[in-house]
Amino acid sequence: MMTNLFSVFDPSAIFNLSLNWLSALTFILVATPIFWTIPNKILILFNSALNKLHGEFKTLLGPEAFPGSSIMFIGLFFMVMVNNFLGLFPYIFTASSHLLFTLALSLPLWVSFMMFGWVNHTKHMFAHLVPQSTPGALMPFMVLIETISNVIRPGTLAVRLMANMVAGHLLMTLLGNQTALASNFILVGLIFTQILLLTLESAVAMIQAYVFAVLSTLYASEITSH
């Protein structure tokens, strides 16, 4: 039963090619506003969201961040959000529900932040391992705890996004499987519940993309702000 339930997240293959992974690149279609001669409502909404995110990420990164650093996190936000939304449509593969996709985003970011910090701001990175006003007897334990918390950051970032995507889709799949044996009265309730869950999942898709981008921005700000 559990194998059949989780099989909805399995990428199907045609001619030994997992073509549905190409859905992860669909975000490129919304990232080309220069090809529009006349701005439409979608483009205006896209530009307003881009400007809002740029101002917020720039504030989180701080004044010592490199110019244009927020553009990377804005692109990360839109990429994750588009993939989350695509998974809500029928017969479209949800790439963000797989650890392979989420870890491929979080791990390179974390490794690049750590390499940059330890090479350019070594003393600052050592100072982060021991919080201020820490008693001398607790310093070795705090170094161990802070090291573990830094090491597991890419894993928690990836698992958080994957788990939230899987949980909502599993619940919708479970309710959808009950429609075949349900009576008319129960069927109406199931459809209404599915609509509410779809609305909730739409909000979760946006929130999780925002959380993923904001946490990545905060991890970068810890390296650059000193």
Image (cartoon, helix red, strand yellow):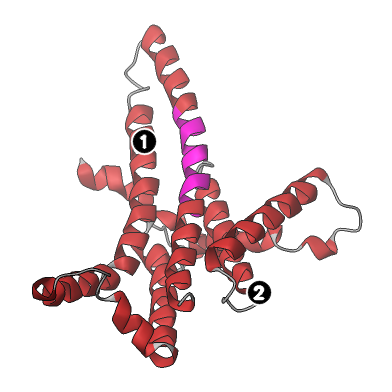
Q: Is residue 198 above or below residue 143?
A: above
Residue 205 screen position, x and y as percent:
49, 45
Q: Nearer the viewer, residue 96 or 13?
A: 96
Q: Nearer the viewer, residue 204 or 147?
A: 147
Q: Is residue 148 left or right of residue 153?
A: left
Q: Is residue 24 above or below residue 45?
A: below
Residue drawn at (24%, 74%) of the image: 130
The quadrant of the picture occupied by the N terminus is top left
Q: Is residue 185 left or right of residue 221?
A: left
Determine the residue located farthest toward the bottom in the rendered image: 119
Could you tell me if residue 27 is visible in this image? yes
Element on which disc 1 rests: helix
Residue drawn at (47%, 33%) of the image: 200
Q: Which mark is residue 68?
A: 2
Residue pointed to by mark 1: 173
What kind of residue is marked 1?
A: Thr
What kind of residue is marked 2?
A: Gly
Determine the residue located farthest toward the right in the rendered image: 37
Query: Are dots 2 and 1 in contact, CB under 8 Å?
Result: no
Q: Is residue 19 above or below residue 151?
A: above
Could you tell me if residue 93 is visible in this image? no
The quadrant of the picture occupied by the C terminus is bottom left
Of callouts 2 and 1, the N-terminal one: 2
Q: What secondary structure prevails in the magenta region?
A: helix
In the image, the segment drawn in magenta is 197-209
Residue 168 figure quarter: top left
